[in-house]
Image (cartoon, rainbow, N blue to C red):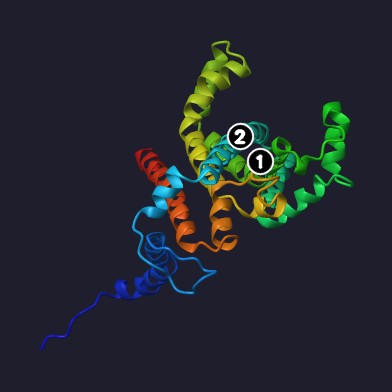
């Protein structure tokens, strides 16, 4: 009887494949099965009856809190992506020149990114504290209309604080990505425009920006994914409040699972969020492979 020969590369890939199956594929499959069942953890420690798509139908047609969390998520993602892109692009343009100060600036950019989002949320909670918060004081000093306003108790200002915390975390990383894109822009095209009499703004708008658009597109897609699944900073900064004004879809999933102990319902909400993330990820992969 001939012995079965297994290539060496199969043995090398086996630990990685086993890890992916255990940490990604199995949880995804199990959570999808849970989303089709009725499981109230407060009543039973085992999954309940099979309900099919009932959880999904209820979420989409008869749950105002879920629909509100979708709206809050869209607002958060829109402002988060826009502000991050604007600041990252501006910082990249300032840091693209060579020099000791710009090199130091690039090194310092890494510091906010390596911090835990939970720690950032706690830090911003101190910054916007009504009694001793430095950000609370400075904004009230610079903008008289904000004097006496408690940021974390105001729905609009709380959203601004959440966006600021997430932008502070991700803008440095996106700046480095855009710096890489700027380095790939051929300097000959910019020099040719300058010879033709174009000023710095014209060179950037007509020459640099069009060549940078693929990188900016990737930045927008990546930041959208990160913003959609943002949870740590929201949990530690506002806890979804005041009320539900900063309760994004990711926080809604957490609250359904560990606040109301409705595991099947939370799994269905999580899968709707996962489906959105998968669609964005597929678009990102198509864009990267195309370029």
Residue 94 location, x and y as percent?
Answer: 68, 32
Query: In this image, 273 relative to 191: left or right?
Result: left
Identify the residue shown where x is 37% and y is 63%: 33
Identify the residue shown where x is 58% and y is 52%: 251
Identify the residue shown where x is 54% and y is 22%: 190
Residue 1 or residue 99, whichever sits in front: 1
Q: Residue furthest bottom?
A: 1
Q: Which mark is residue 106?
A: none
Query: In this image, 72 relative to 3: left or right?
Result: right
Residue 95 location, x and y as percent?
Answer: 67, 36
Identify the residue shown where x is 89% and y is 46%: 131
Please say if the residues under marks 1 and 2 sit with CB atoms less than 8 Å apart: yes
Residue 17 location, x and y as percent?
Answer: 37, 69
Dot 1: few (<14), some (14–19), or many (≥20) neighbours within 10 Å?
Answer: many
Residue annotated with mark 1: 163
Q: Residue furthest top?
A: 197
Query: In this image, 230 relative to 279: left or right?
Result: right
Q: Secondary structure at mark 2?
A: helix
Asked if 82 appears above or below 64 in the picture, the reply is: above
Q: Residue furthest left?
A: 1
Quarter that holds the C terminus: top left
Distance from disc 1 to disc 2, alpha carbons, whole Å, reads: 7 Å
Quarter that holds the N terminus: bottom left
Residue annotated with mark 2: 79
Residue 246 location, x and y as percent?
Answer: 64, 44
Residue 69 or residue 16, whichever sits in front: 69
Q: Secondary structure at mark 1?
A: helix
């Amino acid at each position: 009887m001939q012995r079965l020969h297994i290539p060496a590369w199969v043995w090398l890939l086996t630990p990685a494949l086993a890890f992916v199956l255990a940490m990604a594929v199995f949880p995804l499959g199990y959570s999808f099965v849970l989303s089709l069942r009725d499981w109230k953890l407060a009543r039973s420690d085992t999954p309940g009856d099979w309900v099919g798509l009932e959880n999904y139908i209820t979420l989409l047609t008869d749950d105002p809190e879920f629909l509100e969390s979708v709206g809050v998520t869209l607002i958060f993602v829109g402002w988060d992506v826009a502000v991050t892109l604007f600041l990252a692009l501006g910082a990249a343009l300032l840091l693209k020149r060579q020099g000791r100060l710009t090199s130091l600036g690039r090194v310092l950019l890494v510091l906010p990114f390596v911090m835990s989002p939970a720690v950032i949320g706690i830090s911003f909670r101190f910054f916007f504290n009504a009694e001793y918060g430095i950000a609370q004081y400075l904004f009230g000093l610079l903008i008289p209309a904000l004097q006496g306003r408690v940021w974390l108790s105001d729905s609009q200002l709380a959203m601004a604080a959440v966006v600021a915390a997430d932008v502070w975390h991700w803008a440095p990383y996106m700046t480095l990505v855009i710096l890489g894109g700027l380095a790939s822009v051929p300097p000959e095209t910019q020099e040719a425009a300058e010879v033709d009499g174009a000023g710095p703004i014209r060179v950037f708008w007509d020459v640099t920006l069009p060549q940078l658009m693929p990188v900016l597109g990737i930045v927008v897609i990546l930041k959208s994914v990160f913003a959609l699944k943002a949870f740590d900073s929201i949990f530690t900064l506002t806890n979804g409040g005041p009320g539900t004004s900063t309760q994004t879809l990711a926080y809604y999933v957490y609250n359904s699972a560990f606040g109301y102990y409705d595991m099947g319902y939370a799994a269905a909400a999580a899968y709707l969020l996962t489906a959105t993330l998968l669609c964005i990820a597929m678009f990102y992969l198509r864009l990267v492979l195309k370029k």
